Image (cartoon, grey):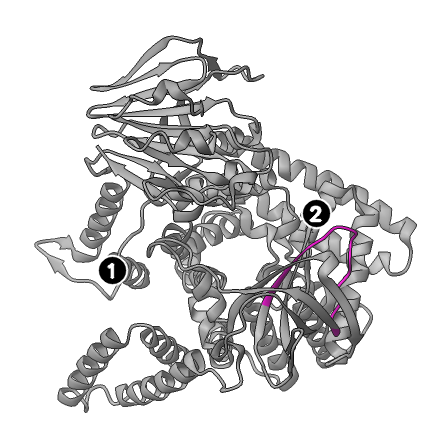
Amino acid sequence: MNKPFVFLFIALAVSIFFCEHIISGTVVLVIIFIFYFFNRKKYKDLIYFIIIFCVGFFYCFFRLNYIPPNHIKKTNYEGKNFFTFYVKDAIENTEDKIYFNGDLISIENNKEKFSNLRGKIRIIIKKNLGIKIKYGDIVKIKGTLKEPEEAENNDDFNYKKFLKYKSIYYIFYAKEQDVEKTGNKIPNYFYYFSYELKEKLLNIIYSSLPEEEAKILEGIMLGNYRVLPEEINDYFKKTGTAHILAVSGMNVGLIALIVFLILKLMHFSRKVSAFITLIFITVFAIITGADPSIIRATFMAYVVLIGYLIEYDSDLLNSLAIAGFFILLFNPAELFSVSFQLSFLATFGIIYYSGFISNHFSNISRQLSEIIFTTFTSQIFIIPVMVNTFHQISLISVVANFFIVPISSIITILGFILWIIGLISHHIALFFGASIFILIKAMVFIVKILSSIPFAAISVKSINFVFLFFYYLFFIILPHKDIDIYFQNFSVKKIIGFVLLIIFIINLCIYKKESYIYFPAIKSTAAVFIKTKNNKKIFLIGCGRDKNIKEIKNNMVLYLKKYGINIIDYLILFNLKNQDNYKIIKNNFYIKNILSNTYFDDKDIKIIPDNTNISVDKDVFLSFYSNYLEIYLKNKILVFASFLNDDFKDSKDKIIFPCCYDFKTIQNFKQNNIIINTSLIEKYYKIKIPDYIWDINKQGEKMLKF
């Protein structure tokens, strides 16, 4: 085996995957063993795969499922208590929240104190006065532990499972006034130095650039995506360039290259330069939060630099496998991390196809081919993950990356120089800050223009495991001319590729002939989505309070993308208070008609007067009135009302969804199908709702077929 770590990585990755799919894993192992038994002379190395698979399976099963006896998960502490935590991990700060993982020290209430418990808790603190939590702090917080919510279906992001893979079983929400620092104890001075350095680097960024550009540079250089404005995030996501807003392996490579070249120019020997560069990239990996893409790139840089130290030339694919093997060995759950999957597959695609591209496209200039084909090959391998995770792919990513990758590379280089100069002189740093400012402005302008192109990004339904298997199999054998079968002069390889393309297009275009009304579980906003049998789609949002942007984005937009919806025939804004909600829908979908009963300063919105009727589809039409909207849906009538009053009392055949209501009035509507959302009116939170009324805020989403 000339690439031993590739073999080890594949065996370990397969064993981890089947830890979550035990029955399938057993079947696969039995098939492999039977195949080996009858072909053991020809495939001698297969026994090593079986051994590693079995050892890896039991090791990973233990790592992923073992909970110590004194873990908080095995106890039950309900109600509010005082929890004391030790901050041993990186802290993420946004304008209004602090995020960190705290190691549990003790729990106490008015009666007793428990100090023998352990466990890691995800803590989210809402800021008021700007409290600062630092690495090594011991904090005492009053609050209640909450279990993360399960995903409602297999296609949704499962936050509970995501935290479980990090050995976190509880979330702890707190307000700043309930937090008290009780001490500080540095667990690791190397980490402490790294986090202190990160604070200084952040100060240099924000003192050298305006706030918005500083946030983007922080995303590029340090990977804190939470500080980025939502609108900017959307531009980069739609153009397939969001990877540059999260610190990546590219940053590690550029910083390692810059440090190594500077040291060489200072006449340090090759070995000394390699050793100092190792220290630099280690510190950089820590201050950026040790993201899997950074760890992978750092491991790869380690292999190359250690190769310099021992005078050994390394193989890139084997180096990638070494990085992947040790990442999974230390934390098997990383295999299920989207970040790990994306960064590993993208790098694999670039390395794997490098020889194929240089042989087939030698007539194109080297710089041009590298930009185009590294983007293209990386996209090939990450598209299935993007589809099944985010339900969206960018159709212009190759074009966008052609412009954005070079600009972001220059920004990264200038950002690193800005840090070095900023540690010496603030005034000189301002010059580099001005240069970076211009480049960031240009970059944002380009992605904004490109993202405005219709269908720059499209929503795609999930694809199944069988398709994924043949998809990756096809692209792995594609660059090998000697791997193919010909049937009457037809290449089986090309036939498989054509069939995969047709299946993907069918998955994209075919829709189910079903009609339904969907009431999403969104807080602070009334929303309804309707799909007719002929695939006409109506999305209605209205009422609500001002702070409800994230609910629409995180819930409704993801829901629509999950079902491959790209076009909305009618977007209806009814008494909508927050225009940002409308903009989020407009930025993510192609909307044919936008109707509103109130004025918006937008030429795309058509104002609909009272007593207006609009035909949408066969047996489906809209009727606008002063305080309510009626949607006729074949055998059902949906009433979206600003207020619930006695005018609807005799409407036994209607589904009524009111924004505002009086509790006594609701009790008079026992014959009706009423759906409410008590989160729209805060004072009703604690009032008991009758059983015949569906409360979205308490009972969750509601779907009705018609």
Query: Is 124 contained in the magenta span?
Result: yes
Depth order, front residue of 485/182 = 182
Query: In the displayed structure, does residue 98 sit left or right of residue 609?
Result: right
Q: Main secondary structure of the magenta part?
A: loop
Q: Is residue 105 above or below residue 288?
A: below
Q: Position of residue 235 (x, y in %)?
A: 55, 38
Which residue position holds label 1?
470
Q: Position of residue 314 (x, y in %)?
A: 53, 77
Depth order, front residue of 678/415 = 678
Query: In the displayed structure, does residue 484 sit left or right of residue 440?
Result: left
For the residue marked with disc 2, what is the amino acid? Answer: Lys
Q: Is residue 282 above or below residue 573?
A: below
* Residue at 38% across, 8% down: 611
* Quarter occupied by residue 182: bottom right
State the quadrant of the N terminus.
Answer: bottom left
* Residue at 17% across, 57% down: 492
Image disc number at residue 493 = none
Name the element at disc 2.
helix
Would residue 77 be seen by someone viewing this image from the given angle?
A: yes
**C-alpha span from label 1 to label 2:** 41 Å
Q: Which residues are magenta?
A: 122-137
* Residue at 35% across, 80% down: 11
Query: Which of the two discs, 1 and 2, sits closer to the camera?
Result: 2
* Residue at 52% across, 16% down: 598
Query: Is 513 contained in the magenta span?
Result: no
State the quadrant of the C terminus.
Answer: top left
Name the element at disc 1.
helix
Depth order, front residue of 373/22 = 22
Would residue 262 be seen by someone viewing this image from the given angle?
A: no
Q: Position of residue 312 (x, y in %)?
A: 57, 83
Which residue position holds label 2?
215
The numbered mark, 1 or 2, whose residue comes first in the sequence reads 2
